[in-house]
């Protein structure tokens, strides 16, 4: 075995110098490439395969601490679901996470008109399973922005994309009816009319768009003027770590408000 290695090494030394340099260069280059690939694989495993607890073994204290660590927390979160299939458990998970993190208003915008009843039932069941019945006493479910201005600690508003389109048309008709001359149509008057028709609730700070397309899915344009949007491919079986990562992205972004 030793003599075989010696013969091979001797044959390499007997080659012209440029051949030896080529072999050395290829060996070093291959080692660098393999190191980079190994580094990328390790980084991928660390970022995707670390098991971060989900709702069922994430305590309320942990989520509250996560909320305090955020540089800024959205006061109003809108969750836009543009998928055909709905997962009530995943939606309820996001509602419970929002409650403990400190988000006061959450709007669920979808194509389903029965999603509110289903999610409200699942939400109450989840709170019972968590032995956190105080959540239900501090939570109010609404079907319209007009009734979401109460003193509840946590408000959940359900709206449909079809309803948003109808409200948009009604406001446009109202503007055209009340204002006959274009010179008197001002931004302040339109803003006042919109708030009269749709409630005086604050515009969403953060929007999470779930679905195959990065779209607002017919959300009312006057409600998303200052909203920071993030796109996620699906809400199905969303993990707490993904939801929290979106909040960290929002906390790190600089909202220039058109400046």
Image (cartoon, rainbow, N blue to C red):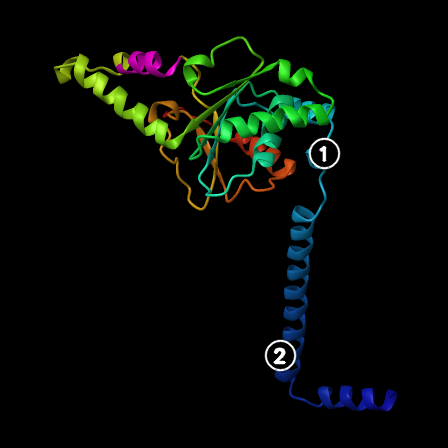
Placement of the C terminus among the 4 image quadrants: top left
Residue at the (35%, 33%) spot, across then down:
218
Does residue 10 lie above or below 71 as drawn?
below
Disc marking residue 214: none
- Identify the residue at the far top of this view: 151
Asked if residue 196 lies in the magenta stretch, the reply is: yes
| SS for dot 2 | helix
Residue at the (35%, 27%) spot, across then down:
164
Q: Which residue is mark 1?
A: 56
Between marks 2 and 1 in the image, the one whose residue lies nearer the viewer = 1
Residue 66 appears in view:
no
Asked if residue 111 lies in the magenta stretch, the reply is: no
Q: Quadrant of residue 177?
A: top left
Placement of the N terminus among the 4 image quadrants: bottom right
Residue at the (65%, 52%) spot, across then down:
44
Q: Which of disc 1 and disc 2 is earlier in sequence?
A: 2
Q: Quadrant of residue 168?
A: top left
Q: Where is residue 190? Give x, y as percent.
A: 27, 15
Question: Alpha-carbon distance for marks 2 and 1?
Answer: 58 Å
Pointer 2 local density, CA inside 10 Å: few below 14, some 14–19, many at least 20? few
The front one of 254 and 62 is 62
Q: Where is residue 77? Give x, y as percent.
A: 50, 25
Q: What secondary structure prevails in the magenta region? A: helix
Q: Which residue is mark 2?
A: 22
- Identify the residue at the far left of this view: 181
Q: Is residue 110 left or right of residue 49?
A: left
Which region of the structure is painted magenta? 190-199
Residue at the (41%, 30%) spot, across then down:
160
Q: Is residue 16 left or right of residue 163?
A: right
Q: Is residue 244 left or right of residue 81?
A: right
Q: Where is residue 41? Give x, y as percent.
A: 66, 57
Q: Where is residue 26? Give x, y as percent.
A: 63, 75
């Amino acid at each position: 075995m030793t003599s075989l290695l010696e013969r091979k090494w001797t044959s390499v030394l007997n080659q012209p110098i440029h051949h030896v340099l080529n072999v050395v260069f290829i060996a070093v280059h291959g080692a660098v490439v393999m190191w980079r690939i190994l580094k990328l694989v390790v980084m991928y495993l660390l970022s995707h395969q670390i098991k971060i607890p989900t709702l069922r073994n994430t305590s309320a204290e942990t989520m509250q601490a996560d909320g305090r660590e955020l540089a800024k927390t959205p006061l109003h979160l809108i969750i836009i679901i543009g998928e055909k299939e709905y997962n009530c458990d995943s939606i309820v998970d996001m509602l419970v996470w929002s409650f403990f993190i400190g988000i006061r208003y959450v709007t669920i915008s979808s194509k389903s008109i029965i999603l509110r009843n289903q999610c409200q039932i699942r939400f109450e069941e989840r709170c019972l399973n968590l032995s956190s019945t105080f959540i239900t006493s501090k939570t109010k479910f609404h079907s319209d922005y007009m009734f979401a201005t109460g003193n509840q600690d946590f408000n959940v508003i359900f709206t449909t994309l079809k309803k948003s389109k109808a409200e948009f048309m009604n406001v446009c008709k109202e503007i055209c009816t009340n204002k006959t001359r274009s010179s008197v149509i001002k931004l302040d008057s339109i803003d006042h009319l919109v708030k009269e028709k749709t409630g005086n609730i604050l515009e969403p700070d953060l929007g999470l768009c779930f679905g195959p397309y990065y779209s607002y899915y017919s959300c009312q344009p006057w409600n998303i003027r200052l909203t920071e949007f993030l796109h996620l491919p699906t809400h199905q079986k969303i993990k707490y770590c993904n939801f929290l990562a979106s909040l960290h992205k929002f906390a790190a972004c600089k909202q220039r408000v058109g400046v």
